[in-house]
Amino acid sequence: ERNSERLSTLENESLELIRRVLNDYADYDKYILTSTGKDSMVTLDLVHRVDPNIPVVFNNTSLDCADTYRMVKAHKGWVSNNPPEGFYHWIERYNFIPQRMSRSCCDVFKEGNGDNYFEKKNIQRLLMFMGVRNDESNNRADREYINHNPKWTNKDWYSLLPIRKWTDLDVWLY
């Protein structure tokens, strides 16, 4: 109850942002990216409240727990984007030792695998909804609502982060 006004404001701001961006990017292909984590699921719910027809893509890192895979399989309309090889085969092939500051799960298995998926579909104009929040890390602290990843070079691809200003508590309360 103490946080209901704040949560209501955040929710309404996020929904309005999603509506506005869907209008501004009307001629773009749109996808919701999910890991099935709390931030992704809040983002998915908010986006689907505005447009329930936007497809959902799960970029499989091959490192998730059984509950994650059960959740993905339970949603028949979701796309499970599987990597060409699993993480453990990949680290063995490259003789790579994962560390706290160098894991490669995001670069290779989320971003890389996701980029390959959209490139294979020959998507030229892309808007991705992602559950990334500024509070999650120093690297994410300065992200804006609309982002263009420098790795996409000349691609007309953007990500929208509708819950970027939400805290952990906001997400859990939602």
Image (cartoon, rainbow, N blue to C red):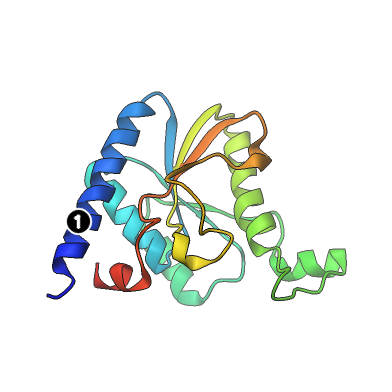
Answer with left or right where residue 151 lies relative to residue 31: right
Does 116 sit above or below residue 88? above
Residue at image position (34%, 54%) is 44
The residue located at (66%, 64%) in the rendering is 105
Task: Tell me the element at label 1.
Answer: helix
Point out residue 8 in the picture as x, y percentages from the top left corner. Answer: 17, 59
Q: Amino acid at mark 1?
A: Thr
User: Is 172 on the left or on the right of 110, as rendered?
Assistant: left
Q: Which residue is mark 1?
A: 9
The image quadrant that residue 84 belongs to is: bottom right
Report how many numbered discs are placed on residues in the image: 1
- The image quarter containing residue 153 is top right
Q: Nearer the viewer, residue 142 or 77?
A: 142
- Mark 1, Cα crowd under 10 Å, few <14 / some 14-19 / many 20+, is few
Residue at the spot 61% in from the left edge and 51% down from the top edge? 111
114 and 172: which is toward the camera: 172
Looking at the image, is 123 positioned above or below residue 105?
Answer: above
Q: Residue at x 14, y 64 (%)?
A: 5
**Of 160 and 69, which appears nearest the observer?**
160
Quadrant in which the C terminus appears? bottom left
Looking at the picture, does residue 47 appear above or below residue 105?
A: above
Q: Quadrant of the N terminus?
A: bottom left
Instruction: Please state the horizontal and vertical placement of residue 42, each as a whole percent of the image.
Output: 32, 60
Q: Position of residue 69 (x, y in %)?
A: 48, 68
Q: Nearer the viewer, residue 119 or 158?
A: 158
Q: Position of residue 27 (x, y in %)?
A: 40, 23
The furthest residue to the left: 1
